[in-house]
Image: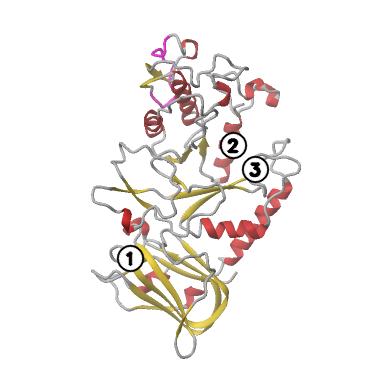
Amino acid sequence: MSPTTSRYSAHSSAASPWRGGKGDLVREVAGAARAAGVKLGIYLSPADLYQLKTNPKNPAGYYGNGSPKLKSTIPTDPASFKSDPAKGRAPSRGFKSYSYEVNDYNRYFLNQLYELLTEYGPVHEVWFDGANPDPSVPEAYDYAAWYDLIRQLQPRAVIMGKGPDVRWVGSESGYGRTTEWSVIPLPTSPDEFVWPDMQGGDLGHRAQLKPGSHLWWYPAETNVTILSNSQWFWARNKKPRPVTQLVDIYYSSIGRNGNLILNLSPDNRGLVPEDQVTALGQMAEIVRDTFAHNLAAGAKASADHAAPRRGAASALDGSLDTWWEAAKGRAGGTLTLAWPKPVSFDVVSLQEAVDHRSQRIETFALETWHGSGWVTAQHIAFDALTTVGHRRLVRLQSPVTTDRVRVRITASRLEPTLAEIGLYKQ
């Protein structure tokens, strides 16, 4: 059942006793997000199980009904949805109508998408998965029409999952790849690409950068449920993951050049249970406390070489819009941080100047000074020191106390950059 009302289905919250059948959960969430300064994202599942033609509760379902493609006006007049799909209803205020040649299910989907994108204010992300309610029932999703409608109605929204803007990381564990490229080679032009799920271990290594491929900025987003049994929906016996695991997920998603969606599961009251709120709060407290004080801020930075006006000090100024960059033609480089007195840390944060120079670093090393020479910092084994991107967090096996640290970039595509270096104590 849809959490919101729709002109195109009676199977929604309007058929429930909630708010006397007049509730609109999306509107309430959108209002709460605006009040809290949170950007709104919309998830509309491509698969509507109620509309499945094999659903005995809805024998007239649109999904897989074999209907032909017809020229259709979006938004369509609900009263003539099937009989005259070219008959439109008045568009939402400030928006226009659009025409697509689609079958019944895609027309139904586009009309609901239109409602979501025109009646709740600015939308910043539209989230799709690859859900299919019954693989034995064929139904083609008209993604091209969906993408076009999103671009027309909410041009600032990114399309996540089955779309061209943000890529699903490939699992629902919350753990990203140890080597995560935001720049992905496509075998065809973006206009022709079908945007499948990408689950390979390294999607952007050099061997894949073949002549004729199209490079596309396609960053990863990880998703995971807070519930320990990996279930998405609440039940009385389902408990949240341990806080230590939630913190580990943070380092293994945000800290591996990804974004993180952590799912909370409302209970039968429509509220997030206290145990989930507590676990999330404890995770947030640990993260905030760890990154509250950047020990690198008190260091003096130097580099073995740099491009003009891109010196090492730019990697410590707190801005992602300034950066150290290697001298022209150099595919590596070393940045050294030195302090008047030793500091103790066990987390290293690196960030490339991706907004200005894209993603370039392929491998790097971390070393600390121990009296008479440099030694390799012993990081946690599964944190391979490969890609950096927007952010790479490296946890050390134990705290290190030293007055000198260096970052050696050992391989890079074009001249590497570092916009920010951070050192922290967990």
Q: Which residue is mark 1?
A: 412
Q: Farthest bottom residue? A: 372
Q: In this rendering, is residue 141 above or below 293?
A: above
Name the element at disc 3.
loop
Q: Is residue 135 left or right of residue 32?
A: left
Main SS, magenta region, reads loop
Residue position marked by numbered label 3 in the rendering = 231
Which residues fall within the magenta stretch? 84-96
Looking at the image, do the residues carrying marks 2 and 1 touch, with CB atoms under 8 Å apart?
A: no
Q: Position of residue 140 (x, y in %)?
A: 43, 26
Q: Amino acid at mark 1?
A: Ser
Q: CA distance from mark 3 to mark 1?
A: 40 Å
Q: What scheme was used to colour the molecule?
A: secondary structure
Tell me the CA gap for discs 2 and 1. 44 Å
Q: Residue furthest front?
A: 136
Image quadrant where residue 251 sits: bottom right
Q: Which residue is mark 2?
A: 29
Residue at 30% of width from left, 44% of height from top? 187
Q: For the residue marked with disc 2, what is the amino acid? A: Val
- Residue 224, label in figure: none
Task: Kindly report which numbered mark, 2 or 1, lies closer to the viewer in this rendering.
Answer: 1
